[in-house]
Image (cartoon, rainbow, N blue to C red):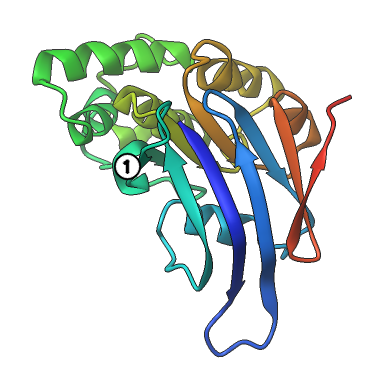
Amino acid sequence: MRLVATGVSYTYPRGDHQVLAGVDFDIPAGTSAAIIGPSGSGKTTLLSLMGHLLPMQTGSIHALDDSGNELRLEDTASWVLQTVSLLPDRTALDNVMIGAYSAGASRPDAAARSREALASVGLGGRENEPARILSGGEAQRVAIARALASQRPIILADEPTGQLDARTSSTVLEAMIGAHDQRTVVIVTHDLEVAERCDLVLELRDGVIHERARA
């Protein structure tokens, strides 16, 4: 799924500072893209506009299939938020299955997808543990597995490795961007090592995007 932004600008209500000032980008289908920039540069704001968590003020962001047809981002994207939201009294597997159910999977298919997704983020064998006993990093991995289990063509992830050590981050990134080249993944990150794993690095500076070549 291709993502195209044209002239995206945004100013927060009751604010006089324009966070985004005409953002343009074109992320090809099946590409992983990192959005980097200093704190307050608008990274999470841009991601929220992409996923329709914030209303668009100026400009547009479109998701296009291989034929150039526009599809609703709400129907094609899964989220990994900074704030992990799990059902504490349900198992890790139950929480991940929510992602598959949201994309219309049957119960057997949802269970199979979810077990595979948990294994891919290093939580195989932990399916039946209640979410409330998981560490912060483990809960983050469950949230990532939930997005993977949806099998939607776009993943929007806000600091998905922020609570993970280097080894676990590598495992999670491989699951998100390494093994599924048909998926388009957009990652907001402050970690340059994470950014360098992506196909594109888009730097937000002074409200606009500057594409950076990888090292």
Residue 26 on image: x %, y %: 62, 41
> Which is nearer the eye, 109 or 24?
24
Left or right side of 171 for 112: left
Image point (46%, 35%), residue name: 155
- At label 1, the amino acid type is Leu
Label 1: element kind: loop
Q: Can you see residue 134?
A: no
Quarter that holds the C terminus: top right
> Which is nearer the eye, 118 or 188?
188
Residue 139 on image: x %, y %: 43, 34
In the image, residue 49 sits, relative to residue 184, either above or below, namely: below
Image point (42%, 68%), residue name: 55
In the image, residue 90 sits, relative to residue 173, either above or below, namely: below
Image quadrant assignment for residue 88? top left
In the image, residue 191 sits, relative to residue 37, either above or below, namely: above
Left or right side of 158 for 215: right
Residue 49 on image: x %, y %: 49, 59
Quarter that holds the N terminus: top left
Q: Would you name the residue on which mark 1 appears? A: 86
Task: Tell how many labels.
Answer: 1
Image point (81%, 65%), residue name: 206
Residue 168 on image: x %, y %: 61, 20
> Which is nearer the eye, 53 or 39?
53
Image quadrant assignment for residue 200? top right
